[in-house]
Amino acid sequence: MTSFPLPVRPRTWARVSLAALAALGIVGASFTLPAPASGAAVERATTASIDSLDFTSETVASGSSAEIRGTWSLPDHPTVPAGFTLALPPELAGRSDGFPLLDPQGAVMGRCVVDASTLECTFAADYLTAHPENLHGTFFFWVTVRNEPGGGGLVTYDVGGHTLAIDVQPSPDPGTGTGPGVCTENCAFPGRGAGKWGMYDAAAGTIVWVVQIGSGRDGLSGGEVVTVTDVLAENQELLAELNGVRYAELWSSPRLVTGADGRESPGAWAPVDRSTYAATDRTVTFTAQAGHYYDVRFAARVTDQGVAGRYENRAEISIAGASDTAVTGQVVRHGGGGTGGGQAPAPSASPTPVPSATPVSSATPVPSATPTPIPAPTPIATPTPSVVAAPAPLGLSAHTGGTVSTESRLMGLLVFAGLTALLAAIGLAVLLTFRSRARR
């Protein structure tokens, strides 16, 4: 299929500013590591050493791109934040890009962002904490060589204290009509088929997919109802807005123009008034005007930080009363990349404990002989006292067997009665004596 220059949409100041932010990885960036702004002073606790740096080719045409590769390293147990910056001279303009630094297992251990004047790389703090030793890696990125017109030969550049040399050849100017690439035969526009391609902004991690509506040399006939539906492949998500522009979006060209290369193609491309067509983030439906050429644009974000490197997309084109067509596009990330890695600290060996000496067991005590109990002395029986019979009262006769006779009992009663009467007499006398004294 013949390829044609991608139409450039006029941008307002606001859109240009947002596009610049996107180039720095600030707008639409999905990577979690901080991406420092271009030209901003980056405060780091540890700066990596750039151990080698050079071009990968020996010759480049002025105005073309050249690849630069390098290696980096960090001291063991670096203090975070850590990273490095490469300042580019004006003659080497960095191509806007953003890419991860991957370790051998595919883990992201850092991220780099390229703009026109610098390469900024920042390492992930959690990775450095887990792998603080033998930290090193590689990186590569692209620059556009911009020498003075007519200049050429071996040119040297100072990049981050390293001297880089490359043979710069003058580039042909197709605008003169004499350089290579200028069309001299079959330069008229023959018409175009349906197709799809993408514009990948590696720094922002976004893709603008362009679906080309096929038509003849004179454009669409007019009155056709056209519906275009986008079908994303993996590692992408559709966006309803990007850099201040609403998507999906319809563009049209009303005429053919001849470019500096001598080829004829649709030109004067411009966005169509949104009030004249229906659109969502994945579908556009419009009615064609006679003699116009149409493109439909969809916006998508890359969801894997550019690791896949290749992204595909499919679109279904339906023209009422004519045909249904499916087209597929692919973008390949031609940008920078890098590697990195470190090692976890070796575990410190625990000291082998010295076994303590087995204590000498004390001698088993000899049991003492159980003493034979001495029997308690048998108590000496207390002699039972012999009962001595009381002598019988005088005057009383005693009979065999100790029985008191009747006469003895009468005698005892008489003695008791006499004693009682005596005591009563004494008590009466004492009472009378007290009374007598009391009267006196």
Image: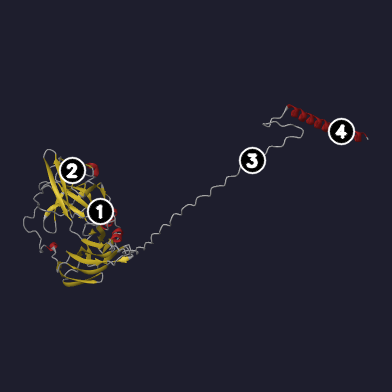
Q: Which badge, 2 or 3, comes first in the chain's sequence?
A: 2
Q: Which badge, 1 or 3, comes first in the chain's sequence?
A: 1
User: Taking the image as drawn, is residue 197 in sight?
Assistant: yes
| Marker disc for residue 95 | none
**Residue 358 position by quadrant:** bottom left
Q: Which badge, 2 or 4, comes first in the chain's sequence?
A: 2
Q: Residue at x 77, y 33 (%)?
A: 395
Secondary structure category for the residue under label 2: strand
| Marker disc for residue 386 | 3
- For label 1, count other residues whose C-alpha is less than 10 Å away and answer few (under 14), some (14-19) or many (20+): few
**2 and 3 marks in contact (CB < 8 Å):** no
Tell me the kind of residue under disc 4.
Leu
Query: Separation of disc 1 and disc 3 at Cα?
Result: 151 Å
| Marker disc for residue 431 | 4
Query: Separation of disc 2 and disc 3 at Cα?
Result: 144 Å
Tell us which disc is closer to us: 2 or 3. 3
Residue 385 on image: x %, y % = 63, 42
Tell us which disc is closer to us: 1 or 3. 3
Which residue ends up furthest to the front in the rendered image?
A: 400
| Marker disc for residue 229 | 2
Residue hosting label 1: 11
Secondary structure category for the residue under label 3: loop
Secondary structure category for the residue under label 1: loop
Q: Residue at x 21, y 66 (%)?
A: 70
